[in-house]
Image (cartoon, rainbow, N blue to C red):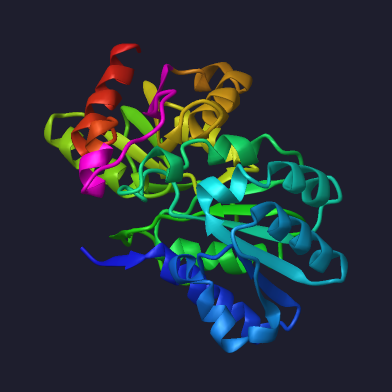
Amino acid sequence: MEKSNMRKAYGQALLDLGKENEKIVALEADLGKSTMSNMFGGEFPNRYFQMGIAEADMASTAAGLALTGHIAYMSTFAVFATGRPYDQIRSSICIPRLNVKICGSSAGLSDFGDGKTHQSVDDIAIMRVLPNMKVFSPADANETEVITKAMADIPGPCYIRVNRNDVPLVTEKGAAYDGKVKCMKDGSDVVIFATGYMVWRALEAAKKLEAEGVSARVVNVSTIKPLDAEGVLAFAKGMKAALTVEEASVIGGLGSAVAETLIAGPAESRIPLVRQGMMDTFGTSSKEYEQLLEEYGLGIDDIAAKAKEALALA
């Protein structure tokens, strides 16, 4: 099982973009060594703006740079990238639809040691509700690289959330970005819509289910907004039940997006749905990342159990 780091993939992709386009600029809130935006800063110091622990100022400055024709990438921990500068993102970036790309690093529970103040369980919901904002949650380092680069060509505000830790590679390197949901494993009983690191865990859960006689289809949803509704409905068609899995709050996140899509779709797609993720709770500190995921019901066995729970509703 090959692993790689999403933060490093983001930093390298940002550096590559800087070499290709002099309009690319990067802003950081005192965490460049962690978000890996310092890779860009080392090569292009005149296009790298260290803003200190002042996220609202960083967002306003990114908006100003975008108004001058630049494509501004701003990075910090996901919890700080979305919560602290919310008003500036809303008023100065989203309303005028500026080319500001926000990277929320150490997303979800992946900053396991620092506890609830540093763990972003609400970032997907916060960014998803904003008009004109696009929201991405890559499954691995390969997808992080592809989406980071694609954002430069996508007009308007974008938000990408990346994991802090090394995670298994599950997608093809260098694949073209098309915004579609992807079937990672086919099945005939239950469809599991997963995002981020949960895609790999859903694939592992599907193996356990197969051993128990349950056929699970696993779908990678790396673009949460705009959601590929046509793809979601197509992969739900013919299934007995559905499960969503996310390392974030189920309120306003992937689970909500899929539920909204299924209920608005044709009758054959309105199948029982169970949402799995952070259940209206903050995280906590832990010595190990995997231990924390287990604590909040995001273990491989937990996903398999939830899939069977969904099937029991059919």
Left or right: 189 in relation to 97: left
How many numbered markers are drawn?
0
Q: Position of residue 93 (x, y in %)?
A: 78, 51
Q: Quadrant of the N terminus?
A: bottom left
Quadrant housing residue 30: bottom right
Q: Position of residue 194 (x, y in %)?
A: 41, 40
Name the residue at the left extreme. 211
Residue 64 in the image: x percent, y percent?
83, 63
Q: Is residue 279 magenta?
A: yes
Q: In the image as oriented, which residue stretches furthest toward the top?
A: 313
Magenta residue span: 272-293
In depth, the one of 229 and 10 nearer the eye is 10
Instruction: Answer whether residue 58 is visible to the viewer in this image.
Output: yes
Q: Quadrant of the C terminus?
A: top left
Q: Residue at x 56, y 29 (%)?
A: 252
- 126 vs 173, left or right, is right
Q: Position of residue 82 (x, y in %)?
A: 61, 45
Horizontal side of 206 relative to 13 (left or right) equals left
Instruction: Residue 185: tell me if it is visible.
Output: no
Q: Residue at x 31, y 27 (%)?
A: 189
Vertical placement of 204 versus 155: above or below?
Answer: above
At x 38%, y 32%, the residue is 191
75 drawn magenta:
no
Vertical placement of 67 versus 290: above or below? below
- Give the answer, above or below, for where 232 lies relative to 77: above
Residue at 47% across / 42% down in the picture?
120
Q: Residue furthest front?
A: 53
